[in-house]
C-alpha cells in the first residue's frame, strides 16, 4: 500500500507526455554505481488490520498502564477534556503546512495569536512565541537569548533545574565558548542565595532557575529577580508544571525577564516524552532576540483584521547564519491543543484545577508523612510535587512498591549526590483520595 | 459560509462565569493554610471564559479558514506535503502509547523501546547508514545534532576545525545550524547546472573545513551526480559530509546516502514518512550516521540484550542530550506504521511516482514558465516568474491567484539562486486529476498575466482575508490581544 492514486494507465500516459519510455529513465541522473540493485530489506507491506494488530501486540508489552503512578518530574498526567482531542484531530488542523500563505491559513495563525496571548496572560509578560520543541530546548534557547541580549559569557543555572534541561543546556552551550555555572540549593530546596550571590560577576548574563523547581519547591522569584538585576543580569524562569500558574503569581510580575518552559500539562498526553510543547515569553524590548516563529495582527487590503507570521528577519529562512535560532518546524499542533485546552478550562477552570492539584498533593504529603520513618527532605513550599526521604534507599523501596502495583515516585540519587534515600512524588487532580490512601497503605506495609 | 462569519478572538466572546469543562469536586479535606508565604495571583487577567459550544464552534470555524492536504493539492517545494494516512493517527492515539510516562522504568515500557529500535533499524536500512538516533525534534534540530556529532569527532581528533561549506541553494536552517554549533559558514556557489562545482569545492576544501552540508537531490530537485567525488574531496582533507535529508522522498528505495559516502544525515519523518505537518509541527528529525560517528550520538541510545531493551546512558563520548526524554515518540509511531504499510516495493514506488508526478508537471508547464536550470530533476522543479514579469506579474501574484483557483501555491522565492522562484513538489500522493487541475490553473494564470495583470496583482479575491499588510505587521508589531480599556 503506497497511498498512490496513479494507475498504470496514468503512468503510461504521463511518461508519454514527459517523453520518456520508463520511470527508470527519470532516474538516469543517479549514477548506476550507487543505485540499489534490488529491494531494501524491509518488512511489509502490511494491511491496515495487520498494522493495527502489530501495534496492539507491541503496546501490550508496555505494562506501565497496569500501575498506579505518582511519577512527574517534567511530564504530568492531567485529565484532557474530550473537546481537545475532538477538535484538534480535524484534518484542517492536522494536515496543513506552516502558515506561510496567510490568506488560507487564518485558522492556524489566529490560533497561534491566541496561544501567544494566553502565554502572555499566564506569565504576565508582553510577548510570546508560537512554540519551541520542549521545555529542555526552551531552557537552552533562553540562556542563548539572554547571552545575545547581554553579550556576556557567564550563565548561572540552578542545580535544582530539571537535570534533563541542564544536560541540554550543556550540549547547546559547550560549542559556543560559554561558561555554565551551577548554583547549589539550600535546605528549603530553593536556589541557595549565598551561593548565588558569590557566583555573579560582571561577565554574568543570566540566572536561569525553575519554579516550581525539580524538587517541586516554589522559588522566591522576587528575590532572585532583584539579585539578578542588581548584578545586571537577566532572570530567566523555567516553568515545567504550568498548571501552577493558575494560582501562583505570574513570574513576569515578580521580575522575570524571560519565561520559558514545558506546556505538556496543557492538553498533551504523556506519550513517552513527546511530542511536548516548549513555550517562551519575554518583554517587548527583547522581541528581536526571541527565537522561533511569531504571529502578529495586521489588516488586509479591505481593512479587515488578519494574522501573519511576522518579525521573520530574526529567523533562519531570512537571516541564515545570523538568525536568533535555527528552529524552523516547531510544535504548532501541540500549541493548538494547548490553546483549546486553556480556552476550555478558562479563567476559573484553570484556577480550580491548580487548587485541586495543590490540595491533593498536600493531602498526599500529610498521609505519607504520617508513616514512621518518612520525612520531608526540603522545607520550601510546594505545588503538586514534593521530595520525601526514607530510611532506606529509594531504589529498594520503589521496587517493593512496584510489586504492590504502585510507581511511587522518581529516584533522585542518580542526579543528586546524597539523595539516594529520596524520591520526587507527584500528585495531580487525577489521583483520587482512594489512590492516595492506597499509596499510603502500601508504603506503610513496605516500611514495616 | 466561511467568508460570511468573521470569527472573533476567543477573548472577545468571553463572558464572566463560563467554563467549558466541569472539574471534579475535591475529595480530600481542604487545607486553608497552604502557600501562606508564597505570592499568589488574584486572577488571570484577560483569560477567556466560554462554554463548550463556543469553544467547539470557535475552533471548527477557525479550522475552516485553513487550507490543508486533506482538502487538496499542496505543492510546496522541499516540504513533501504528501497525504497523511489515517491509520497512523489512530495508532498514535492508542492508550497503550499515549498514557506512558517517559521516566517509567524500562521493564514497564518494553513495547515502546522495541518499536523505537525497530524504527532505528529500518531507517538505517533505508539510508544505508550504521546507527540512528531518534531524539531530534525536527529537521533543523537534526541538522544541529548532526553538526554537533561532526564537531565532537573533530574534537576527538584534537581540533574542532573552523568552517562548514554550504551551497548557496541550501535551506536557511543549514547555515543557522552550523553557526549555532560554533562554525563559520562558507558559501559555495552553484554552477550552471545548479549543482556543486568540483573545482570550487576543491579550492575551498582545506583542513580547517569540518564538513560540507549538502542537500541531495538539492533544492532545485537536481541530483548531485558527482556526490561520490564530492565526498572523496571532503574526506581527503579529513572533513565529513553532512546530508540534509529533506528530499529523501526522491531517493528512498532507489539509492542510499550511505552508499554515496555520506557520513551523517537527518531525515524528516514529517516529510518522507508521511507524518502530518500539523500547521508547522511537531516534526521529527532522526539522525543517521556512519560507524565513526556512532560513539557521539545523543544519550540515551537504545540497546538490546537477551530480548530485553534498555536505555544506555553510559556513553562517555556522547554529545549529551539534545532534547527532553527520547524524541517525538508519537511521531515515530506514525512513521513506523507508514513504512510497514508500504513495504520495500511500496517505498520504491513512492519515490518513483513522486519523480514521475514532478516531471509530468514540469513538462506540462515548461513552455509557459521559465526554468532557470534545465538539468534533469527528480521530485521537484523550480520555475521562475521571468516570463510573467514582462507583464509586471511576480511569483507572489501568481501564488496569490492560485488561491482563487482553490489551490495552494508552490514554495515562493526559494531557493535564493532562482530569482522569483516557484518551487513545486507534487509528491506521489496526487492523482492525475489533481495534477491536471493545477496545470490548468497555472496555464490560465499565465494567460491572465498577459491579458489582465491587475487581476493577479489584486489576488486573492475570494479567500477569508485578502492580501495582508505584512509590512505593517512587522513595523508595528501587535503580538497579543489586549483588553481595550
Image (spheres, coloured by chain):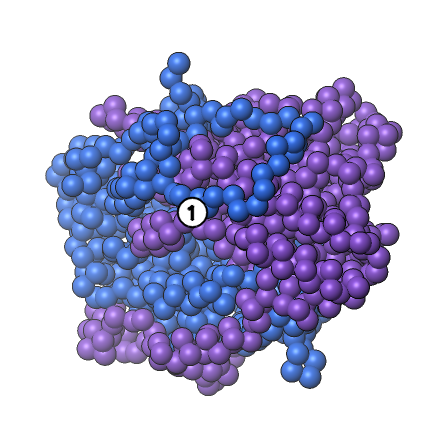
Q: Residue at x 73, y 68 (%)?
A: A400
Q: Is residue B205 left or right of residue B255?
A: right
Which colour represents chain B? blue
Which residue in the rendered view is the most extreme toward the left?
B451
Q: Residue at x 44, y 32 (%)?
A: A347
Q: Residue at x 57, y 52 (%)?
A: A433
Please determine whether, in this image, residue B254 is positioned above or below residue A233: below
Q: Is residue B396 left or right of residue A119?
A: left
| Front in this rendered view, residue B177 or A73 | A73
Which colour represents chain A? purple
Measured from the top left, where is residue B480 in percent x and y? 43, 28
Q: Which residue is mark 1?
A: A337
Measured from the top left, where is residue B10 in percent x and y? 34, 33
| Front in this rendered view, residue A372 or B217 | A372
Residue B164 visible in the displayed image:
no
Residue A331 visible in the displayed image:
yes
Measured from the top left, where is residue A349 in percent x and y? 45, 37
Q: Chain of mark 1?
A: A
Which residue in the rendered view is the most extreme toward the top?
B485
Q: Is residue A365 left or right of residue A325?
A: right
Q: State the image quarter where residue A447 is shown.
A: bottom right
If the image is split into quadrants, where does the N terminus of chain B sit? top left
Q: Residue at x 70, y 65 (%)?
A: A401
If the image is split into quadrants, where does the C terminus of chain B sit? top left
Measured from the top left, where is residue B359 in percent x and y? 30, 65
Q: Secondary structure at mark 1?
A: helix
Amino acid at each position: 500500500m503506497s497511498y498512490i492514486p496513479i494507475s498504470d494507465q496514468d503512468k503510461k500516459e504521463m511518461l508519454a507526455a514527459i517523453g520518456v519510455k520508463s520511470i527508470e529513465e527519470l532516474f538516469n541522473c543517479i549514477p548506476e554505481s550507487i543505485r540499489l540493485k534490488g529491494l531494501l530489506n524491509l518488512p511489509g507491506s502490511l494491511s491496515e488490520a495487520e498494522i493495527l494488530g502489530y501495534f496492539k501486540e507491541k503496546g501490550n508489552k508496555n505494562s506501565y498502564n497496569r500501575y498506579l503512578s505518582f511519577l512527574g518530574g517534567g511530564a504530568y498526567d492531567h485529565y484532557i477534556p474530550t473537546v481537545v482531542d475532538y477538535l484538534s484531530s480535524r484534518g484542517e488542523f492536522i494536515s496543513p503546512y506552516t502558515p506561510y500563505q496567510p490568506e488560507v491559513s487564518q485558522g492556524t495563525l489566529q490560533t497561534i495569536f491566541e496561544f501567544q496571548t494566553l502565554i502572555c496572560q499566564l506569565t504576565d509578560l508582553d510577548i510570546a512565541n508560537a512554540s519551541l520543541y520542549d521545555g529542555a530546548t526552551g531552557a537552552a534557547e533562553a540562556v542563548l537569548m539572554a547571552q545575545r541580549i547581554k553579550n556576556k559569557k557567564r550563565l548561572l543555572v540552578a542545580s535544582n533545574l530539571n537535570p534533563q534541561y541542564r544536560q541540554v543546556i550543556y550540549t547547546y552551550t559547550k560549542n559556543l565558548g560559554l561558561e555554565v555555572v551551577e548554583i547549589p540549593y539550600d535546605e528549603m530546596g530553593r536556589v541557595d542565595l549565598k551561593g548565588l550571590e558569590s557566583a555573579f560577576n560582571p561577565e554574568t548574563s543570566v540566572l536561569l532557575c525553575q519554579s516550581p523547581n525539580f524538587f517541586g519547591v516554589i522559588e522566591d522569584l522576587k528575590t532572585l529577580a532583584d539579585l539578578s538585576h542588581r548584578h545586571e543580569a537577566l532572570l530567566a524562569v523555567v516553568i515545567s508544571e504550568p498548571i501552577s500558574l493558575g494560582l501562583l503569581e505570574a513570574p513576569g510580575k515578580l521580575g522575570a525577564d524571560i519565561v520559558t518552559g514545558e506546556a505538556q500539562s496543557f492538553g498533551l498526553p504523556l506519550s513517552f516524552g513527546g511530542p511536548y510543547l516548549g513555550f517562551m515569553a519575554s518583554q517587548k524590548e527583547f522581541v528581536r532576540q526571541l527565537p522561533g516563529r511569531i504571529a502578529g495582527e495586521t489588516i488586509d487590503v479591505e481593512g479587515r483584521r488578519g494574522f501573519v507570521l511576522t518579525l521573520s528577519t530574526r529567523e533562519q529562512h531570512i537571516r541564515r547564519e545570523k538568525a536568533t535560532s535555527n528552529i524552523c518546524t516547531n510544535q504548532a499542533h501541540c500549541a493548538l491543543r494547548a490553546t483549546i485546552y486553556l480556552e476550555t478550562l478558562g479563567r476559573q477552570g484553570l484556577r480550580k484545577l491548580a487548587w485541586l492539584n495543590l490540595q491533593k498533593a498536600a493531602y498526599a504529603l500529610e498521609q505519607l508523612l504520617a508513616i514512621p520513618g518518612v520525612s520531608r527532605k526540603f522545607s520550601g513550599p510546594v505545588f503538586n510535587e514534593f521530595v520525601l526521604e526514607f530510611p532506606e534507599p529509594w531504589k529498594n523501596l520503589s521496587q517493593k512498591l512496584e510489586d504492590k502495583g504502585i510507581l511511587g515516585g522518581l529516584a533522585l540519587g542518580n542526579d543528586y549526590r546524597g539523595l539516594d534515600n529520596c524520591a520526587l512524588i507527584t500528585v495531580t487532580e487525577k489521583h483520587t483520595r482512594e489512590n492516595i490512601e492506597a499509596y499510603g497503605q502500601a508504603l506503610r506495609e513496605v516500611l514495616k | 459560509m466561511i467568508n460570511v462569519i468573521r470569527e472573533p478572538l476567543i477573548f472577545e466572546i468571553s463572558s464572566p462565569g463560563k467554563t467549558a469543562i466541569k472539574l471534579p469536586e475535591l475529595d480530600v479535606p481542604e487545607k486553608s493554610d497552604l502557600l501562606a508565604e508564597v505570592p499568589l495571583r488574584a486572577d488571570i487577567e484577560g483569560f477567556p471564559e466560554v462554554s463548550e459550544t463556543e469553544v467547539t464552534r470557535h475552533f471548527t470555524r477557525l479550522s475552516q479558514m485553513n487550507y490543508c492536504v486533506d482538502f487538496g493539492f499542496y505543492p510546496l517545494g522541499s516540504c513533501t506535503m504528501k497525504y497523511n494516512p489515517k491509520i497512523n493517527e489512530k495508532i498514535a492515539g492508542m492508550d497503550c502509547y499515549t498514557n506512558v510516562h517517559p521516566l517509567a522504568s524500562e521493564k514497564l515500557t518494553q513495547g515502546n523501546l522495541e518499536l523505537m529500535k525497530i524504527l532505528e533499524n529500518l531507517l538505517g536500512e533505508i539510508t544505508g547508514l550504521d546507527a540512528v538516533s531518534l531524539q531530534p525534534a525536527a529537521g533543523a534540530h537534526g541538522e544541529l545534532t548532526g553538526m554537533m556529532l561532526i564537531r565532537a569527532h573533530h574534537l576527538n581528533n584534537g581540533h574542532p576545525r573552523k568552517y562548514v561549506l554550504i551551497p548557496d541553494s541550501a535551506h536557511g536552517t543549514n547555515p543557522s545550524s552550523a553557526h549555532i554549533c560554533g562554525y563559520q559558514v562558507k558559501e559555495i556557489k552553484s554552477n550552471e547546472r545548479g549543482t556543486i562545482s568540483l573545482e570550487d569545492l576543491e579550492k575551498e576544501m582545506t583542513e580547517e573545513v569540518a564538513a560540507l552540508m549538502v542537500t541531495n537531490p538539492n533544492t532545485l530537485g537536481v541530483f548531485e551526480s558527482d556526490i561520490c567525488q564530492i565526498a572523496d574531496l571532503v574526506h581527503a582533507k579529513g572533513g565529513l559530509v553532512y546530508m540534509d535529508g529533506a528530499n529523501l522522498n526522491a531517493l528512498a528505495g532507489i539509492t542510499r546516502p550511505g552508499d554515496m559516502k555520506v557520513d551523517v544525515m537527518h531525515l524528516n519523518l514529517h516529510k518522507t514518512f508521511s507524518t502530518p505537518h500539523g500547521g508547522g509541527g511537531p516534526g521529527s528529525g532522526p539522525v543517521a550516521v556512519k560507524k565513526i560517528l556512532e560513539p557521539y550520538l545523543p544519550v540515551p541510545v537504545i540497546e538490546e540484550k537477551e530480548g530485553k531493551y534498555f536505555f544506555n546512558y553510559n556513553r562517555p563520548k556522547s554529545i549529551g542530550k539534545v532534547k527532553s526524554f527520547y524524541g517525538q515518540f508519537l511521531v515515530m509511531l506514525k512513521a513506523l506504521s507508514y513504512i510497514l504499510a508500504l513495504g520495500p516495493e511500496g517505498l520504491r514506488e513512492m519515490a518513483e511516482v513522486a519523480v514521475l508526478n514532478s516531471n509530468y508537471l514540469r513538462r506540462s508547464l515548461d513552455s509557459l514558465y521559465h526554468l532557470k536550470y534545465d538539468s534533469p530533476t527528480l521530485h521537484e522543479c523550480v520555475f521562475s516568474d521571468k516570463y510573467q514579469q514582462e507583464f509586471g506579474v511576480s511569483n507572489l501574484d501568481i501564488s496569490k491567484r492560485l488561491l482563487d483557483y482553490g489551490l495552494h501555491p508552490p514554495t515562493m522565492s526559494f531557493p535564493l539562486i532562482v530569482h522569483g522562484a516557484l518551487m513545486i513538489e507534487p509528491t506521489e500522493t496526487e492523482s492525475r486529476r489533481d495534477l491536471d487541475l493545477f496545470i490548468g490553473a497555472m496555464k490560465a494564470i499565465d494567460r491572465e498575466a498577459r491579458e489582465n495583470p491587475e487581476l493577479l496583482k489584486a489576488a486573492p479575491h475570494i479567500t477569508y482575508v485578502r492580501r495582508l499588510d505584512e509590512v505593517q505587521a512587522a513595523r508595528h508589531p501587535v503580538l497579543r490581544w489586549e483588553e481595550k480599556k
